[in-house]
Image (tube, grey):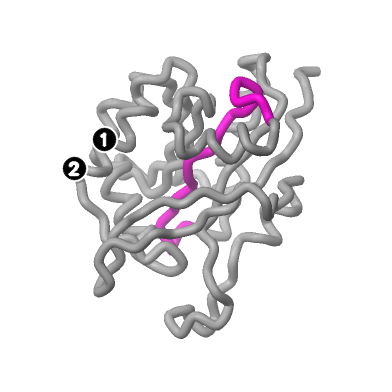
Amino acid sequence: MDSAHAIGLFRGPEIVPYLDEVARLRIAVFGDWPYLYRGDMGYERDYLAAYAQSKDSLFVLAFDGGQVVGASTGLPLADDGAAFSRPFVTAGIAVPDVFYFGESVLLPQYRGRGIGHAFFDHREQHARQLGRFRWTAFCSVDRDAGDPRRPPHHRGNEAFWQKRGYVRQPGMTMLLPWEEAGEGEVIHALTFWLRPLEPRA
């Protein structure tokens, strides 16, 4: 990452001044494949409020000058909604043992510069420092490989996640609705990826 870009860490309510910027970034990035999300600022504010209200949440923001160009979030799974916890309960994984990574969104022109690794490094370190988690986890939307909307040269993040030690859990899937452009509200399946969190050295 070159010197023009800075990473900032914000915990719990420290993120409040940046919520609208993060919301706009989520809408912009998730509007593309594979999420095809037609964003709504009202929904975004409600969604992000859970993170702002959690004293142990973390926002990792990438800045170019004063502009937020990337954002990555995490919070204790117990502080998120029931839909996110349910697959863990079903799998017999204690919800208080899991630190959940909400998303990593980065404008296309800033990709390939190491920012994605920084997002994971900081969130994993934060979860480790809290000292009570056994797992870090996130989920990713499931899409048919033959979906005609898939861009011909799209490269997914699966190899990147696997290199970081995350393993997809096919039996751990949740359903979430969101608006797709041209489709209205669609129910989507998202499958979790897990990694054991080694204790602090």
User: Residue 165 at x, y = what percent?
Assistant: 76, 46
Label 1: how many Cα within 10 Å (few below 14, some 14–19, many 20+): few
Q: Nearer the viewer, residue 120 or 144?
A: 144
User: Residue 77 at x, y = what percent?
Assistant: 53, 28
User: Residue 137, can we see it?
Assistant: yes
Spatial separation of the CA atoms under disc 2 and disc 1: 6 Å
Q: Nearer the viewer, residue 165 or 14?
A: 165
- Number of labels in the image equals 2
Residue 79 versus residue 86 in the image, above or below: above
State the quadrant of the C terminus.
top right
Say which residue appears at 44% left-offset and 29% top-offset.
80
Residue 173 versus residue 198 in the image, above or below: below
Q: Amino acid at mark 1?
A: Asp
Where does label 1 land, which residue?
46
Quarter assignment of residue 8: top left
Q: Which mark is residue 61?
A: none
| Secondary element at image label 1 | helix
In the image, which residues are magenta?
Answer: 93-110
Where does label 2 land, which residue?
42
Q: Amino acid at mark 2?
A: Gly
Give yes or no for residue 100 being in the magenta stretch: yes
